[in-house]
Amino acid sequence: MIAALIDRRGALRALGAAALVAAGGAAAAGTGLAGVKARGTLTVAVYRDMPPFHDQGRGIDVDLAAALADALGVRLSLMPFPAGEDMNDDLRNMVWKGHYLGYGPADVMLHVPVESPLMDANPQVRIFAPYWRDRVMIARNVQQLPHLETLAQLNGKSVAVPGQTLAGWLLIGADGGAYKQQLTTTWKDGVEAAQALQRGEFAAAAGLESELESVVGGDPRFVITPLPTLSNSRNGWAVGLAVKKDAADLEAALQAAVDKLIEDRRIQEIFVKGRVTWRPV
């Protein structure tokens, strides 16, 4: 299941969780739309350290969360959190139960893979409103790599890739490990890898499309394309929202808010601000 392979940023889980408690991140009182309206606040869980969607209080998911709160006529309370061991942990901690350290759950969580297996494995939540489809891509310097129809054309070229991510696993294992010696895998995420490419330290960088585009998108020195010959990286995965199973009214209100953002093209503006081109999911 692709959701189990999606890059889980935020390695310092215990430190991040303690910081949340110290900052006063508490579980929202009451569930559903009525609870949100009564409090006058929408508590939104977003992944910590996931550029360009969230990085030090800014990013696409932060702006989307603010737009959702505004659509409901309430204030935004952002709840950044460090990733758990897998998505099932994150849904339990941030949507339907809360973390054992005392923070969560939120009213809604962003950036949840919209996948049937994940839904089936988590009957306590509702996953809906896909707003972005990400996929593994590779950015390359066109002078050093004018063409990239096959991975074999990487031979002799240096490639930056975050090792503990789907992009890293795909390239490390590609063609029986044929390219391992060319990879530098020390990067935290695709943003850092793309920044190294931008500085001229590598011929190419792999990562998520959103990560790469937020750094080198629009720069004529670089192009961003799917990883050749690795078909399982081409279609990617959609991400959306998740609420508690018994919050059907909140689900409907948030779905309507996302639909309106798409209809009014405001979601495009949110992504453009994050240096990413939004596409219909």
Image (cartoon, rainbow, N blue to C red):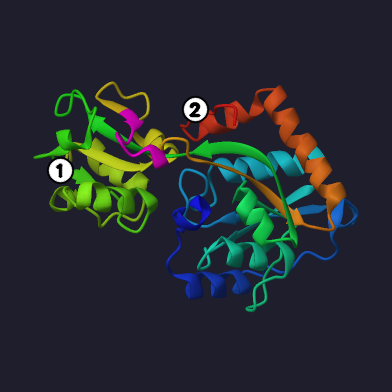
Which of the 4 image quarters holds residue 210?
Answer: top left
Of residues 138 and 11, the one nearer the viewer is 138
Residue sitting at x 45%, y 58%: 9
Point out residue 34 in the picture as x, y percentages from the top left corner. 91, 53
Question: On the rendered image, what quadrant is the C terminus found in?
Answer: top right
**Is the residue marked by circle 1 packed among few (<14), some (14-19), or many (20+) residues within 10 Å?**
some
Q: Is residue 232 magenta?
A: yes
Of residues 24 and 163, the one nearer the viewer is 163
- Give the number of the disc on residue 117: none
Q: Amino acid at mark 2?
A: Thr
Which of the 4 image quarters holds residue 238?
Answer: top right
Q: Amino acid at mark 1?
A: Ser
Left/right of residue 35 with respect to residue 118 in the rendered view: right
Which stretch did the figure color magenta? Answer: 224-233
Q: Is residue 206 magenta?
A: no
Give the labeled residue for mark 2: 277
Give the labeled residue for mark 1: 158
Measure how far apart labels 1 and 2 are at the Cα level. 27 Å
- Name the N-terminal-most of marks 1 and 2: 1
Point out residue 21 in the picture as x, y percentages from the top left corner. 62, 73
